[in-house]
Image (cartoon, helix red, strand yellow):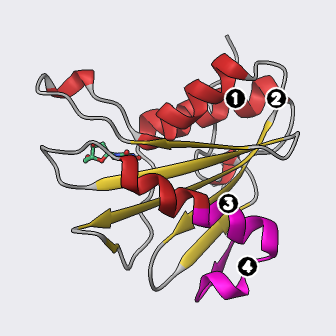
C-alpha cells in the first residue's frame, strides 16, 4: 500500500486592486453579471465571466425556475453561451462571484460540482488551462487550472 497526497496551490488576494489589470477586468465583469441574476427562490445572485483566447469576455448569471432543477448556475450559463457562440475559442479564465441583497458575499463562492465538471470539459476542449478566480468581498482566490478545483478529473471517455 502506498499513501498518496494531492496538493493544491492557489493564491489569495485581499482586494481587486491586488489583481493584475486583466484579472481585475474579468472580476469586475463577474460582479456586473450578478445584476442579471434571476434568483427569486434562493435570493443568491451569482455572476460569472469567461475570458476567451481572443480576449473577449462572456458574462453569465444564475437563472432559476419554479421547477427548481430546470434552473442553471451562472458558470454554466456563461460557459454554454461561450461554447455555443465561440466554438473555436478556448476559455482561458473564469471569474465567479455572488451577492445577496446587492452586497458582495465576503467569502468567495465556490463552484458546485456540476460546474466544475463542465469547466473540466471546456478546459479539455480548448487545450488550454482555464484559470479560476473566486471573488469575495474580503478575499479573492485564484486557481491556475480546473484540476486544482477538481482533482482526478473524469475526462477519459
Ligand atoms: N449557483 C450558481 O450559480 N453557481 C454555483 O456554482 C453554485 C450555486 C446558484 C444556483 C442557484 O440559483 C443559487 O446559486 C443557489 O444555489
Classify residue 46 as left or right of residue 60.
left
N-term mark: 3 or 1: 3
At mark 3, the secondary structure is helix
Q: Nearer the viewer, mark 4 or mark 3?
A: 3
- Of all residues shown, which one is farthest toward the top? 157
Give the residue drawn at x 58%, y 45%: 150
The residue that disc 2 covers is 126
N-term mark: 1 or 4: 4
Say which mark, if any, is on residue 26.
Answer: 3
Residue 74 x, y percent position in the rendering? 44, 42
Residue 89 x, y percent position in the rendering? 83, 28
Q: CA distance from mark 3 to mark 1?
A: 18 Å
Q: CA distance from mark 1 to mark 4?
A: 24 Å
The residue that disc 1 covers is 122
Mark 2 closeness class: few <14, some 14–19, many ≥20 residues within 10 Å: some
Magenta segment: does it hold 118?
no
| Residue 7 seen in the current view | no
Q: Quadrant of residue 52?
A: top right
N-term mark: 4 or 3: 4
Classify residue 68 as left or right of residue 17.
left
Quadrant of the image for the C terminus? top right
Q: CA distance from mark 4 to mark 3?
A: 10 Å
Q: Is residue 44 above or below residue 57?
A: below
At mark 1, the secondary structure is helix
The residue that disc 4 covers is 19
Q: Quadrant of residue 45?
A: bottom left
Amino acid at each position: 500500500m502506498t499513501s498518496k497526497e494531492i496538493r493544491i496551490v492557489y493564491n489569495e488576494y485581499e482586494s481587486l486592486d491586488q489583481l493584475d489589470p486583466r484579472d481585475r477586468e474579468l472580476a469586475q465583469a463577474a460582479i456586473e453579471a450578478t445584476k442579471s441574476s434571476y434568483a427569486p427562490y434562493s435570493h443568491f445572485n451569482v455572476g460569472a465571466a469567461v475570458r476567451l483566447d481572443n480576449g473577449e469576455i462572456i458574462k453569465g448569471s444564475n437563472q432559476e425556475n419554479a421547477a427548481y432543477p430546470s434552473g442553471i448556475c451562472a458558470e454554466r450559463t456563461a460557459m454554454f453561451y461561450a461554447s455555443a457562440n465561440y466554438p473555436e475559442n478556448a476559455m482561458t479564465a473564469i471569474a465567479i462571484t455572488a451577492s445577496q441583497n446587492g452586497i458582495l458575499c465576503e467569502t468567495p463562492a465556490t463552484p458546485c460540482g456540476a460546474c466544475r465538471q463542465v469547466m473540466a470539459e471546456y478546459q479539455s476542449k480548448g487545450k488550454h488551462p482555464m484559470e479560476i478566480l473566486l471573488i469575495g468581498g474580503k478575499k479573492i482566490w485564484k486557481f491556475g487550472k480546473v484540476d486544482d478545483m477538481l482533482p482526478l478529473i473524469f475526462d477519459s471517455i
